Image: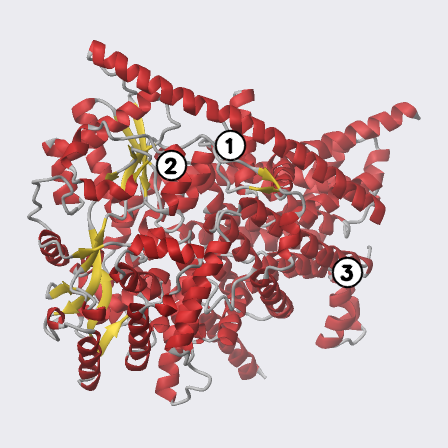
Amino acid sequence: MKKKLAALVLTMTTIGMAVTGCGNSASTQKDAPVAAAEGESSESESAEKEEGGAETADKIIIFQSKAEIQDQLEDCAEAFTDETGIEVEIWGTTGDDYQQQLETKLANDQGPTIFTQQSGDILERLKDYCADLSDVECMKDIPEGLTADITKDGKTMGIPYTMEGFGIVYNKSLCDATTLKSTDDFINLIKEQKEAGNEGFELTQEDYFLIGHILNTPFALMDDPDAFIADLAEGKSKMADQDVFKEFANMMVDIRENCSNPLEQNYDGQIGDLATGKAAMIHQGNWCAGMFADYEFEDAGMAPLPLAGNDKLAVSVPYYWAINASADAAEQEAGKKFLTWLYTSETGKSYLYDQFGFVPVIKGDVNENLDVLSQDMQSYVEAGKTIGWNMAKWPANSINVYFAPLAQEFFTSDMSADDFLAGLDQAYADAIANQGN
Amino acid sequence: MKTKKILLNVVLILLGLAYLFPVYIIVVNAFKNRAELYENILAFPKDASFKYFTKAMDKMDFSHAFMNSMIVTCISLVFIVVLTSMCAWMLARNDGKLSKFIFMMFVATMLIPFQTLMMPLLQVLGFFRDYCGIQLTDTLGGLIFCYIGFGTGMSVFLFHGFIKSVPVEVEEAAIIDGCSKLGVFFKIVFPMLKPVTMTVIILNVIWIWNDYLLPSLILYSKKNRTIPLSTANFFGQYTVQWNLAMAGLTLTIIPVVIFYLCAQKYIIKGIAAGAVK
Amino acid sequence: MNARKKKEAAWYALFVLPVVIVFTIIVIIPFVIGVGYSFFSWDGLPVHEKTFVGMDNFVRLFSDSRFMVSAGHTLVFTVIAVVLINLLGLAFAIIVTSRIKVRNILRTMLFMPYLIGGLILGYIWKFILGEGLKAIGEAMGNTGLFFNWLVDKKMALVALIIVAIWQMAGYIMIIYITGIQGIPDDVLEAASIDGANFFQQLIYIKLPLIMQSFTICLFLTLSNCFKIFDTNLSLTGGGPNNATEMFAMNIYNEIFKLNNYGYGQAKAILFLIVVASFTLMQVSITKKKEVQM
């Protein structure tokens, strides 16, 4: 019996390896059409320029990750079909497993025409699937700074959705967080609020809201964040040696001592606390304004997290529209047509600004219908008071898999600031070590 | 004695209700907005209007999704029940090495975590599309085909276990009477399997009806969405549109509850029939 | 003789082959392909190269402390959950097959949790075992036992076990019911005429006669508990500090979060070998104790 089992295992293994090997060659074959399609598209483009008529498919598929705009996008797609005759199909999505679904579909050559793309390690991973959009008409009206992160090897592979920013979101009837000038001011305000019986400041259990976003601040405050990240990756620098990180770790200890345990709070509850006046400040972004409506709450504002005297909001473009480079040339062309329409036509823009509530990324455009938090953010952008997002530059999934467990340990124990920093360094090193295996 | 019995019944019902406490949370919160839910998750809703239900139904394209789910569940089920019961009977009655091997193969593969099969499965389906011209992705037929494959293990396992306790003599008598194997199976064996068939049906219906992962992998287009897929939009990355999600969930489980109540009657009937015989 | 054998074989094929073919296409072939990938270092995207690394992925497993820790949690979780689910499921089955008046409604009630699939259960229980317990603790002044279990490493595992039991006990009950009702009435009647009381009937007649249900239920609970994923993800997300990260979630993270497809497959295969040896052992032990009728 045992012998047979061993024989069986052996055969299975051999067959498996053979099949996988075949899959390998098949996949290289599959790559060929991609390359061919790219070649074709540039050929057909040059042909178009001569003939002046583009060959476009009559149907495109959109798969995107922002569940909040899904319904509006469907209406928008209908409007586009009415105007151009190109049919648009929108695949349903959940915020949670979007990336996994996208990748399995792309990997099996059944990808959508247009999809949501992010910068950083996800772009590095999927760049072969992202068509170059430099030649799309609206691109020239988008400031270069907004597309820098999605540009690689001279190709701009995405059109920004909107701008998003995070920092302190505060309840104006309880405090004014814009007056905070230092970490000490911040901690003192938390203590004051605590004495008054309120929650001073809330983080929550979700990985990004627990550690991801707040850890961005010390990174962004380094003189040259990119160089620092490169040094970290090579083990040349340590967070534990940087003053701003030391101040950050001490601030986190103060937060732990003076606020309730973030692991016992979730995003929904946090917004409830802010809106009902139980919490003075939370660490959030302009996206949470959408949840205020049910509370009939508008008295909120945004302010920078004043770590080491920081007076800037962390603003970036987290999502981009990308076009699937492995789709037919005609389909890609239709996809570009949709994006151009969305960002340049009057109907398109009305959806973008009025329905999706996006902060304009096109030079000269103003959206007068922004929510309270986005208005604050927009004024910081106009004043040039912004710092970048570094989360996407960290190793793949470092937040979920490495930083979050550490932060959970930190908030449920009496880990010291030094140990916390050492832990962050270790987590970062682990994440680097696990990359690309 | 009698009061003791009544008391026992009352206690049992109360325990049953306590057991269903989470279901209560689901239902009441289908009627609340975010502010109300934040205020008190347990409280009775202030406004008992069904507006979130109609909104959820509208957003889910409920009738369409319902039809798709019905088609997939029913057809998969017919195939699973007929094919696996036949297979299990043969395997149980011919207890040779081959049968043992096939049976063990079914059983062992039930242990594979589905997540590791996802990518290769799509490759296999892609192979059928590219080389055989059979479209298995984004079609209800393809989904049904997959359900038959994934449903096999447990169903054969359940039938196999039950068939062993069914006396062989009747079958042998029928064969001597000149009945073909097919005849013996459908005329004599299959009716005797009624209780376990009902169990197989119930467990498979619930699994297929509620399954999210497999359809999310295989179906993309809106026209093919099943009910669990159509509620997916209510789930954002960090928050859930609780009222719509709870309403959607309630709408999803009502058909299964009705089905279960009907099926339950048949279990009892099946047993009664068995007892008479 | 030969013709008869051929005919037998044809019947065998007719009954067995359809299922085997579908099953091979849907489960076996993908599985074999997956086994193949476990010898490669690959991130799961066909445009990226696969590098053959031989047994490296498997060697690496044994020094992967996080995987080993998660294996430990899974084992503890599975053993406790399997025992409790089966005890409770059997108890439920015995109650609802007795002559109690409310048995029908009770059966529906106990089965209800299984009707609600998926992630949302985890979210609901998260509220009950998190905020709910905390509120109870504060109200009763007993914060030693009643606090947010999900932030405590040990209690988070307990929470996961409770939810798993709640969800699966009713499901297992259904299979035990089938078994109990398969017992011929005349046997039980004979026993009660002979003066056997409820417990004697249970221990000497019912339990031995439903051995095949035990085989099935133990196996199903074992495999379901080992594979637990949805509840794990939505209830604890593996936290706090990975204290409740089970096998399936660890594998899922490796494949879809860390993009180590080949390594993730290697984990899955090791996992399968371990679990298969456990459960097949269990099946062959309990099968021997079954009573043929």
Question: Residue C273, image x and y in percent?
Answer: 69, 52
Question: Residue B200, image x and y in percent?
Answer: 61, 48
Mark 1 or 2, closer to the camera: 2
The chain to which mark 1 is attached is B
Circle number at residue A127: 2
Q: Nearer the viewer, residue B117 or B28?
A: B117
In the picture, measured across the screen, residue C83 lies left or right of residue A218, that is: right
Q: Between marks 1 and 3, how big is the CA–CA gap?
A: 37 Å
* Quarter that holds the N terminus of chain B: bottom right
Corner quadrant of residue A421: bottom left
Q: In this view, does B273 lie above or below A211?
A: above
Q: Which residue is disc 3 drawn over?
A: C286
Q: Nearer the viewer, residue A212 or B64?
A: A212
| Residue, far front | A236
The chain to which mark 3 is attached is C
Q: Which residue is disc 1 drawn over?
A: B142
Q: Which residue is drawn at 33% across and 34% down?
A: A153
| Residue, far bottom | C141
Q: Specify whether disc 3 shares its chain with disc 2.
A: no
Q: Between marks 3 and 2, how big is the CA–CA gap?
A: 54 Å
Q: Nearer the viewer, residue B220 or B118?
A: B118
In the picture, measured across the screen, residue C191 lies left or right of residue C239, that is: right
